């Protein structure tokens, strides 16, 4: 039985590796097509705007802005619907949270507009580096891209934090508990958790969620440690470590296009370290 399980896991690992390679290749192709689409769309917009008078351009902008606000308001109101039901948010809280998100969205859109040329140039340079197999240059451009987009990501984080700040402490705790529990259930979806394990996991999420000033990111490792120490079986722990190792390999070495044998060696070394 042990040999059969090991062989089954090896087959599944190999399949996962091949699937990830296909996904990475597909991602690169999609990014190329999207870049072409953006270029064509921009040219079309420029041609269209050149025909309009200044007055028509102003009216069009006002109409587009109003429509964007309406659509975003509806989106965020719907997005916070489950939060409203779970945490008991008032209608005023939902409206305030939507307004905060809209303000941040506007700032993020402005950042994207101001940095469009820089982003486009880096994406083009990165694609050229990928096509030529220059892994060092790809990593360097990725680092530069990460630094460039840091302010944008900060705005995204601020949007969530400001919206979350509209909630009372007990509402935050309920929502964090729900987020954590659903996220871990998703992560463990193929681990065949028993009802008792699920109950313990929910209790762990409930306990850590009471911490004031906490976020899902800050609480995640605490639930993870609790699950690994007291909830999962030895077989489930092994499965978790193997899965995490594959994700690490695929996430950090995809550009190197490792062979299945190389991935297996890296995985074997990691498993020995954590044994």
Image (tube, rainbow, N blue to C red):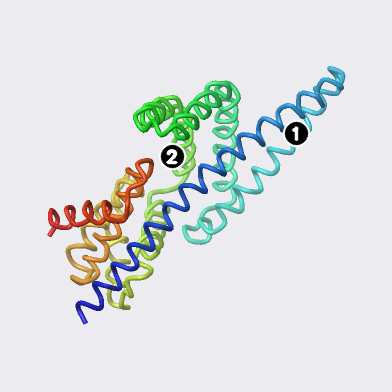
Quarter of the image with the N terminus in it: bottom left
Residue 85 has which mark? none
Q: Secondary structure at mark 1?
A: helix
Look at 44% across and 41% down and name the residue there. 165
Look at 26% across and 72% down and name the residue there. 7
Query: Residue tagged by mark 2?
Result: 161
Q: Are marks 2 and 1 in contact (CB under 8 Å)?
A: no
Q: Secondary structure at mark 2?
A: helix
Q: Position of residue 253 (x, y in %)?
A: 33, 43
Q: Quadrant of residue 224?
A: bottom left
Look at 55% across and 40% down and name the residue there. 31
**49 w.r.t. 90: above or below:** above
Q: Position of residue 92 (x, y in %)?
A: 58, 47
**Which mark is in front, 2 or 1?**
1
Specify whether 63 is left or right of 259.
right
Q: Quadrant of residue 109?
A: top right
User: What is the tally of numbered marks visible in this picture?
Assistant: 2
**72 w.r.t. 268: above or below:** above
In this rendered view, identify the residue nearer to me: 112 or 255. Answer: 255
Specify whether 124 is left or right of 207.
right
Look at 42% across and 48% down and name the residue there. 168
Q: Position of residue 85 (x, y in %)?
A: 53, 61
Query: Residue tagged by mark 1?
Result: 64
Q: CA distance from mark 2 to mark 1?
A: 27 Å
In this rendered view, identify the residue nearer to me: 175 or 140. Answer: 140
Q: Position of residue 22 (x, y in %)?
A: 47, 53
Quarter of the image with the C terminus in it: bottom left
Question: Dot 1: within a 10 Å radius of its alpha carbon, few (fewer than 14), some, or many (20 or more) residues?
Answer: few
Of pointers 2 and 1, the one earlier in the residue sequence:
1
């Amino acid at each position: 039985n042990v040999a059969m399980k090991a062989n089954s896991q090896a087959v599944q690992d190999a399949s996962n590796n091949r699937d990830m390679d296909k996904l990475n290749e597909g991602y690169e192709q999609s990014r190329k097509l999207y870049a072409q689409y953006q270029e064509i769309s921009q040219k079309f917009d420029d041609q269209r705007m050149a025909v309009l008078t200044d007055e028509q351009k102003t009216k069009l902008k006002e109409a587009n802005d109003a429509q964007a606000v309406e659509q975003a308001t509806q989106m965020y109101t719907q997005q916070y619907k489950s939060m409203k039901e779970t945490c008991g948010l008032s209608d005023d809280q939902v409206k305030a949270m939507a307004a905060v998100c809209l303000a941040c969205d506007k700032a993020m859109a402005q950042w994207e507009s101001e940095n469009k040329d820089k982003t486009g140039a880096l994406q083009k340079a990165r694609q050229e580096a990928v096509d030529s197999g220059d892994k060092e240059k790809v990593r360097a451009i990725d680092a530069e891209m990460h630094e460039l987009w840091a302010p944008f990501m900060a705005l995204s984080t601020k949007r969530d934090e400001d919206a979350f700040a509209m909630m009372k402490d007990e509402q935050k705790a309920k929502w964090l508990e729900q987020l954590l529990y659903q996220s871990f259930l998703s992560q463990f979806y193929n681990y065949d958790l028993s009802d008792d394990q699920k109950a313990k996991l929910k209790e762990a999420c409930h306990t850590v969620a009471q911490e004031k000033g906490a976020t899902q990111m800050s609480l995640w490792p605490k639930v993870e440690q609790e699950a690994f120490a007291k909830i999962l079986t030895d077989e489930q722990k092994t499965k978790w470590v193997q899965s995490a190792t594959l994700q690490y390999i695929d996430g950090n070495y995809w550009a190197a296009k490792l062979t299945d044998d190389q991935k297996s060696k890296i995985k074997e070394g990691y498993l020995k370290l954590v044994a």
